Image: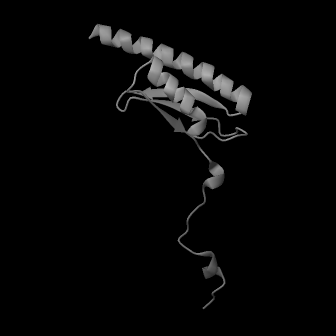
Amino acid sequence: MKDKRLELKEKLRLTKKICEEECNLLYLEEDIDLTYDHYSPEVGTVYLRENSKTVNRVTHASVKHIADRIKKEVGARWYLGLIVSRPELFAWYTGEDDDDEDDVF
């Protein structure tokens, strides 16, 4: 049991190192601002968080090389997820259509 914990700690250290290196390169080359957020052992997924004030938005295609590197160097069952917040896409839904405002009864 202790060996598995040590093995997981080593894998997490390697994963954080990979994410730091690759996220720094993405920032320099494509101006995409990402950082390592956390690892979820329940689903075997490493999550990267996008800075909400980044100039260029992250896509799964832009981080595919990071996911491939993690699978190759850490483990084939490790996945990569993205945490993004895009406030410009959110709108409050009131249940009313824009056309309803013109209709007065």
Q: How many marks?
A: 0
Q: Which quarter of the image is occupied by the C terminus?
A: bottom right
Task: Report the front residue among 103 and 59.
Answer: 59
Rendered residue at 38%/29% (across/down): 44
Image quadrant in which you'd find residue 92: bottom right
Image quadrant in which you'd find residue 36: top right
**Residue 49, image x and y in percent?**
57, 33
Residue reaching furthest to the left: 1
Rendered residue at 66%/52% (across/down): 88
**Residue 58, image x and y in percent?**
62, 39
Image quadrant in which you'd find residue 63: top right
Rendered residue at 70%/38% (across/down): 54
**Residue 7, image x and y in percent?**
37, 11
Measured along the vertical axis of the image, is residue 2 above or below residue 32? above
Rendered residue at 65%/40% (across/down): 52
Using residue 72 as the reference point, say whether residue 43 is left or right of it: left
Using residue 8 as the reference point, say whether residue 68 is left or right of it: right
